[in-house]
Image (cartoon, coloured by chain):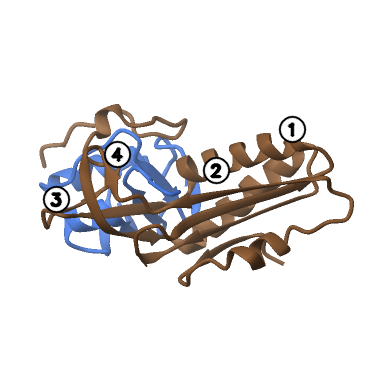
Amino acid sequence: MNEFTISSQTIDLPAFRASLADASCGACVVFEGWVRNHNEGRAVMHLAYEVYAPLALKEGETILREALQRFDISQARAIHRQGELAMAEPAVVVGVSSAHRDAAFNACRYIIDEIKHRLPIWKKEYYADGTAEWVNCRHCATSHSHAKTLPEIKAQTP
Amino acid sequence: MKRVTVKWFAAYREATGTAAEAAETAAATAADLFAEMMSRHRQLAAFSGAMVAINDEMVDWTSPLADGDQVLFFPPVAGG
């Protein structure tokens, strides 16, 4: 069974929470990432996620496996949306169940941070003024840099 | 020369105007190929935070290219 999934439908939160049920667990932490109506001072009307599913699924499963190895938890799951999303919809949900709360909080934080930095998923925001932009591409020079980032490259003259 | 397929996503797809293209290249690495592509596509920018995958595996920009590779260029990601 796949613990990491990409969904084109509104995330069913009660079903997601139920999927984490485990009689050996005393703690369950669920993080929901919501569509926010503003970003960097601009009013956001709606947004769309583009997902490269083959790699996002593989890398998503890897992140969940890493969390299960690093933290003393029983279950870890996540769902990420793709396509058009309306205001206040959950865009991503991460759930962890464990015997005790510390591990669940830490693992949940780890998973959402890695999802944001590693999965081939892009967010396009549509603003009230009619423009649209890919998030992270306006201030790329100062954006989060990861181990596999592009070195300084200059265009070659043909 | 190697024959590779280049795939573009999100902001890169919009900058190049295509989702996929064939390229014949002497580029040794993924970074070299990207630099070559920058001369082909004037709108293309080398974003810091961009990533690359070869044949559906995330790799370093210094990874070597082989004939028949499918090279995926990812602009900075923004999941969550």
Q: Name the residue located 32 percent from the left edge and 31 percent from the top edge.
A: A143
Colour chosen for chain B: blue
Determine which of the numbered discs, if any, sits on residue A112 in the image. Answer: 2
Between disc 3 and disc 2, the foreground one is 2
Q: Determine whether the residue tagged by mark 4 lies in a helix, strand or loop.
A: helix
Furthest residue to the bottom?
A9
Q: Chain of mark 3?
A: B
Q: Which residue is mark 3?
A: B41
Kindly check if marks 1 and 2 are in contact, taking CB atoms under 8 A apart as contact: no
Between disc 4 and disc 1, the foreground one is 1
Q: Quadrant of the N terminus of chain A?
A: bottom right
Position of B2 compared to A69: left or right?
A: left
Q: Earlier in the sequence, mark 1 or mark 2?
A: 1
Specify few, some or many for label 1: CA neighbours under 10 Å numbering under 14, 14-19, or 20 or more: some
Q: Which residue is mark 1?
A: A102
Q: Name the residue located 29 percent from the left edge and 56 percent from the top edge.
A: B10
Determine which of the numbered discs, if any, sits on residue A51 in the image. Answer: none
Q: Name the residue located 52 percent from the left edge and 38 percent from the top edge.
A: A113
Q: Chain of mark 2?
A: A
